Image: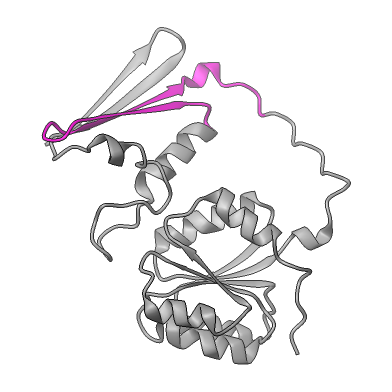
């Protein structure tokens, strides 16, 4: 049973509570529930992005989010948001950092068949100041490269229909041999390890990961490579 409740709070806030009568979460799962890509569901059954996306939207609106759960007793998620009458003027955009290097901005080819994963990573990359070209398959990524697109970085999922990551990777490499490729996957098997070990320009970032880990990887890249 799913129950939704709303109410006005006395301090110019509104509250939205979503409660279920499901199996609940133990403390160790609750502690990670807001992490991007963290899920207890089987592979292919969940992305681990639902709660993290909700948390991001609530935080962006200067709100608060609280999770209460107990095994066998269900889960309640409470959102508290500013009422519209108390909305503050949007802050002025921060001036650009004059010390920022143009090399810090990357053109990223994002290859993932999951709509939610692509949307989430696109938002993270935009927040980090990078431009993203999202595609849903290896075939589409290869087509973009053949049309002349020259990314500074490729983020490649492994488990996709069609070519999949393992078959897309060598084709990407033949088109753009110098471009760094970041493999992101929640299932690290020997195939993935062999792909990483066989190419110094290929790096593995296991799911789940967050903005901090992705930012650290991109900042560690050398100057944008030129492809022959």
The quadrant of the rendering that contains the C terminus is: bottom right
* Above or below 150: residue 51: above
Q: Quadrant of residue 106?
A: bottom right
Q: Is residue 98 above or below residue 197?
A: above
* Residue at 64% in and 75% down: 180
Left or right: where 104 falls relative to 217: right
Residue range corresponding to the magenta coloring: 61-90
Left or right of 58 on screen, residue 21: left
Horizontal and vertical percent for residue 168? Answer: 48, 85
Is residue 83 in the magenta section?
yes
Above or below: residue 132 compared with residue 89: below
The quarter holding residue 43 reads: bottom left
Residue located at (60% from left, 87% from top): 173
Tell me which residue sits at (43%, 50%) in the image. 36
Residue 128 x/y as whole percent: 65, 51
Tell whether position 158 is magenta. Answer: no
**Image-based side of 148 in relation to 119, left or right:** right
Q: Pinpoint residue 111: horizontal percent, then vertical percent.
A: 50, 72
Question: Splitting the image into 4 quarters, where does residue 88 fall?
Answer: top right
Nearer the observer, 135 or 212: 212
Q: For the N terminus, give its image quadrant.
A: top left
């Amino acid at each position: 049973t799913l129950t939704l409740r709303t109410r006005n709070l006395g301090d110019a806030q509104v509250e939205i509570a979503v409660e279920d009568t499901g199996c609940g979460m133990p403390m160790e799962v609750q502690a990670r529930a807001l992490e991007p890509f963290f899920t207890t569901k089987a592979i292919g059954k969940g992305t681990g992005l639902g709660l993290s996306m909700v948390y991001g939207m609530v935080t962006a609106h200067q709100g608060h989010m609280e999770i209460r759960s107990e095994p066998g007793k269900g889960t309640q998620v409470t959102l508290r948001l500013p009422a519209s009458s108390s909305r503050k003027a949007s802050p002025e955009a921060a001036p650009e950092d004059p010390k920022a290097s143009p090399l810090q901005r990357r053109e990223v080819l994002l290859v993932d068949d999951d709509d939610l994963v692509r949307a989430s990573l696109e938002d993270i990359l935009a927040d980090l100041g990078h431009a993203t070209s999202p595609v849903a398959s290896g075939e589409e990524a290869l087509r973009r490269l053949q049309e002349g697109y020259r990314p500074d970085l490729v983020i490649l999922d492994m488990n996709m229909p069609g070519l999949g990551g393992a078959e897309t990777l060598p084709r990407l490499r033949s088109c753009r041999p110098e471009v760094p490729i970041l493999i992101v996957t929640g299932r690290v098997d020997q195939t993935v390890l062999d792909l990483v070990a066989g190419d110094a320009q290929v790096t593995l970032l296991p799911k789940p990961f967050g903005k901090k880990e992705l930012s650290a990887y991109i900042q560690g890249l050398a100057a944008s490579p030129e492809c022959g």
